[in-house]
Amino acid sequence: MSPDLKRKVLLFLAIFVISLNLRPAIVSVGPLIHEIRLDTGLSSTVLGLLTTFPVFAFGVFSVLTPVFTRRLGIEGTMFLALIILTIGIFLRVFPTISLLFFGTIILGIGITLGNVLLPGIVKNHFPANFGLMTGIYSALLGIGAAVASGVSAPLSEGLELGWRWALGVWGFLSLTALLLWMPQLKQNAAVKARQGILKSLKYLGSSKLAWSVSIFFGMQALTFYTLVAWLPELLIDRGMSSVQAGWMLSVVLITGSVGTFVVPSWASRRERQRLPVLIIVIGEIISILVLLSPTLFIIPFWMAVLGFCKGSSFGMALLFIGLRARDTDSANELSGMSQSIGYLIAATGPVIFGMLYDLTKDWTIPLVFLLTAALIKLWSGFRSGYNEFV
């Protein structure tokens, strides 16, 4: 094996494991919310912050990622991201509410850096296969999330680890990713930015296309993190056990990983991406309407449809970053803007959803809130689907 091929294989393996790490720390909360509520006595609105805090960190630190890459390099910043993620996860094991929330904020910063860096890393090292690689690593994000959501309740109840270690066990996975990324530090070099952050934001802020990509990213992320936080609780209220509800969230995430792989690969070969956007939004709307019904009839099927559409939306959001940028620098800048604005939008989702439920004691108004987000996503996706560059 040539040195160049060996480096590519090691890089692919590292990206593989990093991708598996960027969702479990967040999605493992949803299946455990009922248990956390009983143990801590926290309200639905406050518990929504366990999902909102990391998503808010995504929004704030996404745009600041170039500050780190200029000092530490891309590889060095990814290394720092994995260190922060690991520390944040293990902090939540300690039996204090303050460390539960502080660790959640810390791990959110680590995930943020990884989220922003991955599209640029893939575009730089796999330019000829950007659509395929985007599908692969975004599918792995879904697989990691699916496993975490499915096993969280069994880890807590079946293995009697308790909800704190059911959250903390994912620190060992992030530690593995940290070790696998270390060989990439040999290639590390400080990034010389083409332009400053403020200048970049001013330039992108004047682009309607960049705003469309950002809003699309925000709407799909808002729905995703809201469902991650509250879907198990909704299904438990409908009569499911916590373990069954956790596995229903896994169905959403597993089928989502299929969508993230299949749809971006297909959409990247099209001159425009408006048809894929239309299909996935229609499927999402129908699935949410099904959740308005109090019955659990064929709910696994509709959760599979919802998951496929949600995963496809995420894959399309990442694809738009690459397709609407001319080069790696532009991709990193657009990635920072779209993820910063997008995740700030998304951070409101779990709290608003929980607050609407606290106010109404019913799931109808919160689900109408998600339907509204889907319609906004349809509009922004149509605009992002034009064959143009920012």
Image: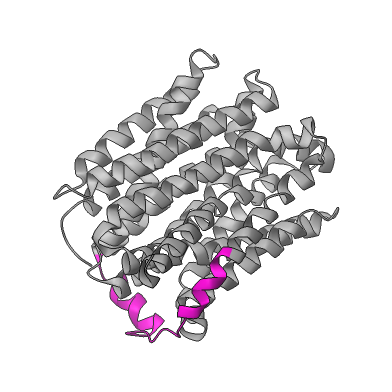
Residue 192 included in the magenta stretch of the image: yes
Q: Position of residue 113 (x, y in %)?
A: 52, 67
Q: Is residue 198 left or right of residue 157?
A: left
Q: Is residue 361 left or right of residue 225?
A: right
Q: Position of residue 356 (x, y in %)?
A: 58, 38
Q: Main secondary structure of the magenta part?
A: helix
- The magenta region covers 180-207
Q: Nearer the viewer, residue 58 or 69?
A: 69
- Picture quadrant where residue 338 is located: bottom left
Please indicate, yes or no, whether residue 166 appears anywhere in the rendered image: yes
Q: Position of residue 184 (x, y in %)?
A: 49, 73
Position of residue 241 relative to residue 342, above or below, is: above
Q: Nearer the viewer, residue 169 or 101?
A: 169
Q: Residue at x 66, y 43 (%)?
A: 29
Q: Residue lying at the far right in this picture: please name it.
A: 95
Q: Position of residue 166 (x, y in %)?
A: 74, 43
Q: Residue at x 34, y 83 (%)?
A: 199
Q: Residue at x 45, y 71 (%)?
A: 63
Q: How many marks?
A: 0
- Picture quadrant where residue 294 is located: top right
Q: Quadrant of the C terminus?
A: bottom left
